[in-house]
Amino acid sequence: MRIALKALGRKTILVIPACCWTVIDGPSPYSAAGVPVMHAPFPSAAAAATGVRAALDLQGDTDTTVCAWAGDGGTFDIGIQALSAAAERNENILYVCYDNEAYMNTGVQRSSATPLGAWTTTTPGAHIKDQPKKDLLAIMAAHRIPYAATASVAFPDDLAAKISKARSIKGTRFLHVLAPCPPGWKIPSDRAIKAARMAVQARVFPLVEIERGTTWRLTLDPGRIALEDYLKDQGRFRFLLDNPPALEAARAAVEERWREIVGRTGRAMCG
Ligand SMILES: Cc1ncc(C[n+]2csc(CCOP(=O)(O)OP(=O)(O)O)c2C)c(N)n1
């Protein structure tokens, strides 16, 4: 959030649905963000942001950026209807999903952003998640919005550049930011940035940007580490590592998505 707001500047209004950030920001009318914040019901971040944008436009204020800021539960699952509707209308909003891969605020329940093989309280040891992470980036790209991108808290320059670029574009912009949750990922807090970096290096979370849904680009190639190195670093994958068929399914899901992305960028980086 600090990096995003630096890139966005003070002329920003945040719209935040139920998620960890409603707690971090503090109760209305106070805000730790230093910009106006509107708290929205869980499913309605994109619809509420659309309304704020319309109100600003009526006042002739075209400078202020309206930024919806939501977790993966509020985006991939419960907010997707409003998000898809706003994207289809090409509403002039920036939508940022910070993805910690579960409903963390309410005690680590599975979301459709939870990766295959992860432990959560609703996918416990003997029943780890057996579906791959929903490919929301591809879903957003299919709306042919002007700009969609992934970013990671471990690569702040790339994140800031994407926020600045998104700010300069009109229409619906979507940013998907990987942001580890130490208790949910079962890592110490001081290893959160390392985990976020390893996700990109293990090709679990490729950094890309997409213009008009058609032009895909890999924005950073940070070298490669083995998938196991990423998984071993986190307690939530303990059961996956003990389950060879599930581990192979997880590896196949990562590799299949990487090949899809590389195919869309038109680059020969499959090796
Ligand atoms: C309609 C509705 N259902 C459930 C809740 C309870 N609730 C509040 S926050 C939350 C989880 C949010 O998860 P996510 O969007 O991933 O954000 P995170 O907590 O991980 O930051 C839930 C289930 C709610 N506020 N409203």
Image (tube, rainbow, N blue to C red):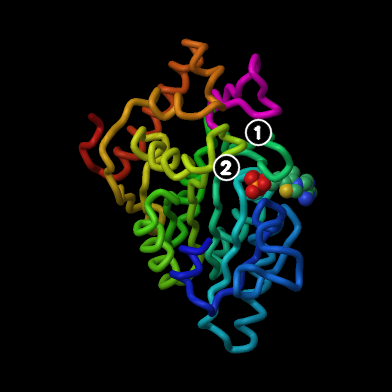
Residue at x 64%, y 61% (from the top left corner)? 46
Residue at image mark 1: 110
Q: Was residue 87 drawn as part of the magenta stretch in this picture?
A: no
16, 215: nearer the viewer? 16
Q: Quadrant of residue 227?
A: top left
Magenta-highlighted residues:
115-131
- Is there any visible trace of residue 73 in the rendered image? no
Camera-nearest label, 1 or 2: 2
Vertical order, 212 against 116 (above or below): below
Q: Quadrant of residue 36?
A: bottom right
Which label belongs to residue 181?
Answer: 2
Q: Mark 2 near ligand 1 (CB under 8 Å)?
A: yes
93, 199: nearer the viewer? 199
Quarter placement of the C terminus: top left
Whole-number angstrom distance, CA of label 1 to CA of label 2: 13 Å
Residue at x 61%, y 21% (from the top left corner)? 128
Q: Amino acid at mark 1?
A: Arg
Which label belongs to residue 248?
Answer: none
Q: Was residue 118 drawn as part of the magenta stretch in this picture?
A: yes
Residue 82 in the image: x percent, y percent? 66, 56
In the image, is 227 to the left or to the right of 36? left
Vertical order, 116 against 173 (above or below): above
Residue 261 in the image: x percent, y percent? 35, 39
What is the count of numbered marks? Answer: 2
Residue 230 in the image: x percent, y percent? 41, 29
Q: Mark 1 near ligand 1 (CB under 8 Å)?
A: no
Residue at x 67%, y 22% (from the top left corner)? 124
Q: Quadrant of residue 64?
A: bottom right
Looking at the image, is mark 1 or mark 2 earlier in the sequence? Answer: 1
Residue at x 48%, y 56% (from the top left corner)? 175
